[in-house]
């Protein structure tokens, strides 16, 4: 892939553990790793076991299960995507968010230390910056989360940094922007837009057409995660942004979507905020990981519409 480093500069992944493998990002990572011929161990909660016969059941909030997973399946690389997937998920269960995201990560870090894992890739979020920073945000921006979810991601990064500094774990956190594309199961504005267009129903959106979005296609996120996992040597930074090349106003997203979904009829309800993040800098990510997003918004939306249209036809 163009967004990965050249093969001569890559570290071998060895045996790879992907947590959250039944989820949106985790399942896409497993699929790509298998296609690349890598040896993959994939885990998720026990109730997700039926999703795949090879899935290893592991509740990350249970230390004994995490220890057993790493003892029974020694690995060289961990990609930790097993977490609550956004601030809209379990918003009324803040303690559960904390236990899954923070306690689960701590148990996994401890088992990675004992198992001498070669690299630990933590899937974090741009929510660590909060909603208020203005301009193009790089990884040195201050943390300012405004949700328990965002605060939990700050805590997971702190845990990773502590294990790295004190115990030598080779770890990196990836601050992921708004992931979209086929396979996403949690409700999003983009999904609502597409489903409304497919049903030829009008939709009124909260917010304003001028407000910026930070959508990044699932394939690009997978490429960024694997670039971090494969980057050779000690990485210069502890955290990197994984986002699209530029943020796009929501009104432009709607117009781009209309090009592939002419039946879409959308209006906006609110006035724009006075300030918002203009986007997330990829300068460090490109320099150190060789990552650049490859899928344009128009192409990503085309693929997403096609997937949801196929799903709708299959459900009839």
Image: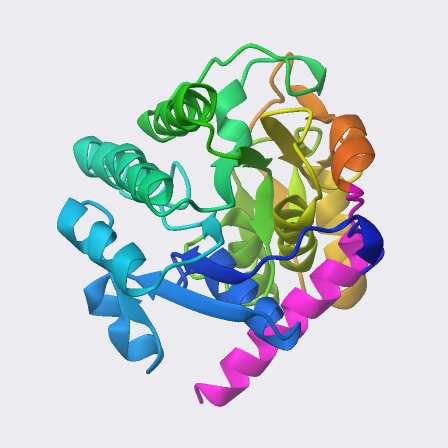
The answer to whether residue 6 shows anywhere in this view is no
Query: Which quarter shows the C terminus?
Result: bottom left
| Foreground of the two, 239 or 298 | 239
Vertical comparison of 302 with 295: above or below: below
Q: Count every numbered label the image shows and give the total.
A: 0
Q: What residue is shown at x 31% (from left), y 61% (from top)?
A: 44
Vertical comparison of 50 with 185: above or below: below
Q: What residue is shown at x 41% (from left), y 55% (from top)?
A: 186
In magenta segment, residue 229: no
Q: What residue is shown at x 51% (from left), y 34% (from top)?
A: 125
- Bounds of the magenta segment: 290-316
Where residue 35 sits: x, y (%)?
64, 76
| Foreground of the two, 55 or 176 | 55
Vertical comparison of 58 with 176: above or below: below
Where residue 248 sits: x, y (%)?
75, 37
The answer to whether residue 108 shows anywhere in this view is yes
Where residue 120 sits: x, y (%)?
49, 42
For the rendered model, the colour scheme is rainbow
| Foreground of the two, 199 or 21 | 21
Where residue 38 sits: x, y (%)?
59, 70
In magenta segment, residue 291: yes
Dominant secondary structure (helix, strand or loop) of the stretch shown in magenta: helix
Q: Is residue 236 left or right of residue 3?
A: left
Residue 232: quarter of image: top right
Residue 234: quarter of image: top right
Vertical comparison of 5 with 281: above or below: below
Query: Which quarter shows the N terminus?
Result: bottom right
Q: What residue is shown at x 67% (from left), y 12% (from top)?
A: 134
């Amino acid at each position: 892939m163009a967004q990965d480093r050249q093969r001569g500069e890559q570290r071998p992944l060895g045996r790879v553990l992907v947590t959250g493998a039944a989820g949106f990002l985790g399942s896409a990572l497993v699929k790509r790793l298998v296609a690349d011929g890598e040896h993959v161990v994939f885990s998720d909660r026990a109730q997700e076991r039926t999703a795949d016969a090879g899935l290893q059941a592991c509740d990350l909030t249970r230390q004994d299960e995490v220890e057993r997973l790493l003892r029974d399946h020694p690995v060289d690389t961990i990609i930790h995507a097993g977490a609550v997937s956004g601030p809209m998920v379990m918003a009324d269960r803040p303690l559960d968010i904390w236990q899954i995201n923070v306690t689960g990560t701590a148990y996994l870090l401890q088992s990675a230390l004992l198992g001498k894992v070669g690299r630990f890739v933590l899937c974090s979020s741009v929510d660590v910056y909060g909603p208020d920073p203005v301009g193009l945000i790089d990884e040195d921006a201050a943390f300012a989360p405004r949700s328990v979810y965002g605060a939990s991601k700050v805590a997971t990064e702190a845990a990773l940094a502590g294990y790295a500094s004190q115990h030598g774990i080779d770890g990196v956190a990836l601050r992921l922007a708004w992931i979209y594309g086929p396979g996403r199961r949690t409700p999003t504005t983009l999904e609502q837009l597409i489903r409304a267009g497919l049903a030829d129903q009008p939709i009124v959106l909260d917010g304003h057409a001028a407000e910026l979005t930070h959508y990044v296609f699932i394939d690009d996120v997978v490429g960024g995660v694997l670039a971090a996992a494969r980057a050779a040597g000690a990485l210069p930074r502890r955290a990197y942004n994984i986002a699209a090349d530029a943020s796009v106003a929501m009104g432009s997203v709607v117009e781009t979507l209309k090009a592939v979904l002419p039946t879409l009829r959308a209006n906006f309800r609110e006035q724009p905020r006075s300030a918002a993040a203009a986007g997330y800098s990829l300068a460090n990510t490109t320099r150190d990981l060789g990552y650049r997003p490859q899928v344009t918004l128009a192409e990503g939306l085309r693929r997403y519409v096609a997937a949801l249209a196929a799903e709708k036809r299959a459900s009839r």
